[in-house]
Amino acid sequence: MVERDIIVAGLPCGYEYEFISSVFEEYHCHICHLPLREPVLTRCGHRYCKKCLDEAIKRQHVPQCPVDREPLDREKDIFPDKATERNILSCHVKCPSEGCDWTGEVRHVEAHLLSCDCKIIRCPNHRCQAIMEKRLVEDHVMNTCQWRTSQCGHCSDKYAKCEEEKHSSECRRIPVDCPNGCGEFIPREEVTSHKEVTCPQSLVNCQYDYMGCSIKVKRCEINDHLEQSLRSHFELSVDKVGRVQDECKILRQEFEKMKVEHQGINHKVSSLEKYLSELKQKHRDMETFSPFTWKVTDFWERVRRARNGIEVRIESDVFYVGPQGYKMKLAMYPNGTKEAKNAHISLYIALMKGHYDAILPWPFHYKVTLTVIDQNPDLTQRQNFVKSFVPDPSWKSMQRPASAENERRGFGRFFSHEKLIAGSYVIDETLFIKFEVSPSDKRA
């Protein structure tokens, strides 16, 4: 006898249908004792539901036939019993749903249950635990399910039918009695506005409260109060006007005082502005003597901007060459000009109209030296890049400036980007260029 304790509650096993005709004993599972579902046949000749036998073997250390304890090899000793399955599927049964008159072959039961009106199913509302016949579901969902969806007629919010009372106690649009007892029904969310603006039973301040009347009356009685208090309101108004006149006198005196102070402040501000203007002029005229070193920050970003046509030229601060000397500035094209574009930086000098031009010798004839400083931390390894030129006396750019600045003169192919990258000339996006002048070997 096979022990039934190897069957786990709820485990799929044989057919529990009510068969119209009896099923042969050999077509019953030796474990669940029901007509076989997916029958399998062992080498020793015993039949089981496939899942019943699988569960039984799973609980054994060594697979054995539950009837005669013969060892079983899952791959070699257990076979699907298709002939038996066909016979069982051809048997006629009654519908497992109570109250249904349908009968048919076992193979058709599942298809029938899909449309069986007597099948017991759960309410489709997932929070409802009610079960019923399928034919009753529609009426239940529409009319009796406590979890069916209802819609508020005041605010249009949706809620479960069983929560209707809770919603009614919270609904912002449901009409409620005015708490002041004026007899009006207003939406709950408008109660405060009603009390403050229109409710005739709300206590309100007298219109002369700013004059000093501290009486509060119902809104519907305010006109009576105004008529009855004409004299007291007039006296309050007279008193208020007197106080206002005194305050205006004090304010006028303070205003005159502030006016005088304001004039003094304006004078000080004018003096400071004049002083600041003089400082700015001195700063602009500050003389930077040769050699002059130009610190160019964000160098590669400036190259990128020049390539995009955003800022093709940058200029140094203005400087003077020696005390009471020539006024100059440097101009750089980070991405080069003309044939040097995209490969070199172009560097030029420009003579500018200065304070001391009248006492200087012209044309400018000094040797100009431009140096890109190597920033290698090891001073012994530094290799500065140097270029220089001696002005030709015939150059118009070296004559005394007649306008703000002369035409620039310098090098289109001053220094290649390739060498800048290869060396230590640009560190932390910063490039240093030094300008120097010295006597030339020849004079015009």
Image (cartoon, rainbow, N blue to C red):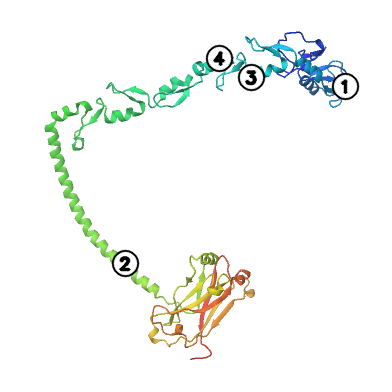
In the rendered image, residue 3, in percent from the top left (x then y), is placed at 80, 14
> Which numbered circle lies on residue 125?
none
Secondary structure found at label 3: loop
Contact (CB < 8 A) between labels 3 and 1? no
Q: Which numbered circle lies on residue 273?
A: 2
Whole-Å distance between the Cαs marked 4 and 2? 93 Å
- The x, y position of residue 348, in whole percent, is 50, 77
Q: Amino acid at mark 4?
A: Leu
Residue 188 location, quadrant: top left
Sort mark 1 into few (<14), some (14-19) or many (20+) by Cα contacts within 10 Å: some
428 or 298, which lies in front? 298
Give the Cα separation between the discs numbered 3 and 2: 95 Å
Q: Residue at 19% across / 50% down in the picture?
A: 251
Q: Which callout, 1 or 2, points at the residue further toward the start of the chain?
A: 1
Is residue 278 rendered to the left or right of residue 418?
left
Q: Position of residue 7 (x, y in %)?
A: 75, 17
Indicate the secondary structure of the residue bearing disc 1. Answer: loop
Residue 364, placed above or below residue 26:
below
Which numbered disc flags the more N-terminal residue, 3 or 1? 1
Question: What's under tag 3, amino acid-wise?
Answer: Leu
Which residue position holds label 1?
Answer: 71
- Residue type for callout 2: Glu
Seen in the picture, residue 381 relative to 150 is either above or below; the reply is below
